Amino acid sequence: MTIIISDNLVLTLQQEEGFDSNNPIIGWQNLVTPSNLSSGSTYNDDPVEDELYPTANLANTSTYQRFQQTNGGESFWIQVDLNGNQDVDYLAIAGHNFGSKQRSVQVFGALGFDSNGDPDFMELTDAFIPGDNTPLIFRFVPGKYIAIRLNVESSTQAVNDIAYAAVMYVGKLLVMERKIQVSFVPLNYGRRADVTSNRSERGHFLGRTVVGSWLETSATFMYLSPDWYRDNMDDFLKAAQTEPFFFAWAPETYPEEAGYAWLMDNAEPMIHVPGDVPYMQVTLNMQGIVE
């Protein structure tokens, strides 16, 4: 579970008054659809998708369905075409094997077209090789991009070096107004498992079998401004009734403690009126994928 933050974004946000790069982020807005997705070879733009695992599967929130390349060891790109009417500042991936395949990944964006009428791409993040297959969040300078592209580079020509990914989100992050104020278990440490213990007729221990596993935690946000909640967070909670999201509780200090999660129940905001100034509080009880 890793957040890749571009250097340009750090410089840009440091200039904002009151900015704190460790405020939690939630990637719930997703502009990816089956119709605006495409993929191709890095070298000649030829198709790379397996017909049984098309690129359009990346627009599905399920980590069971996925995009998968046909030819092993081939470098490729995945592109999302946008209308350029709204700010975009993140791309996220879940259900991939880029870490185990040692694939180098990098995000590019285009604000306009070149002389041939194609998107004029520029680097938005540095190239990065994930250390594992847990969810990835790429955070970059906000812009009204007409296209976002993820490059996935291979260092081998092995025919069995087949890369895949299940979910792609592209959109505008929700940056929380406050940090988590109470005790909290980072999502990647909230390990849960359904386990059966095996024993013989005479009571000998024969081992344990994991029949299912997931991650689970609870994050409470307090002292939220009522106006901020209404303007920024309520739309997320409406969507989260059915849709999963990417979550990171301390993006700068603990960039590896992020994940792809969904709510376990309804998150209802409570208004506290301790004096003249009310504030709001909301708790996110969530589960996430292990890898």
Image (cartoon, rainbow, N blue to C red):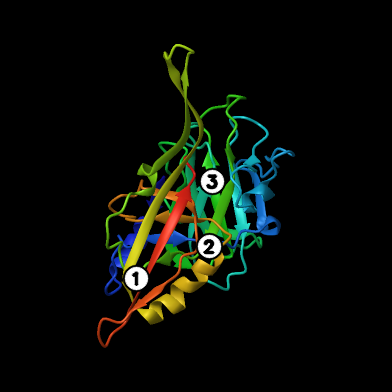
Q: Is residue 274 above or below residue 250?
A: below
Q: Residue at x 50, y 64 (%)?
A: 266
Which tag is nearer the camera, tag 3 or tag 2?
Answer: 2
Q: Amino acid at mark 3?
A: Asn
- Three-letter amino acid code at the position of disc 1: Glu
Quarter where residue 11 is shown: bottom left
- Closer to the chain start, of discs 3 and 2, is 3
153 relative position to 258: left or right: right
Q: Earlier in the sequence, mark 1 or mark 3?
A: 3
How far across and how far down the image is residue 257, in percent? 36, 47
Residue beneath disc 1: 177
Disc 1 from disc 3: Cα separation: 32 Å
Reading the image, the residue beneath label 2 is 240
**Which residue occupies the foreground of this view, 36 or 44?**
36
Q: Secondary structure at mark 3?
A: strand
Q: Position of residue 228 (x, y in %)?
A: 39, 78
Q: What residue is rendered at 30% in x and 49% in y?
A: 254
Q: Residues within 10 Å of mark 1 (few under 14, many from 20)?
A: many
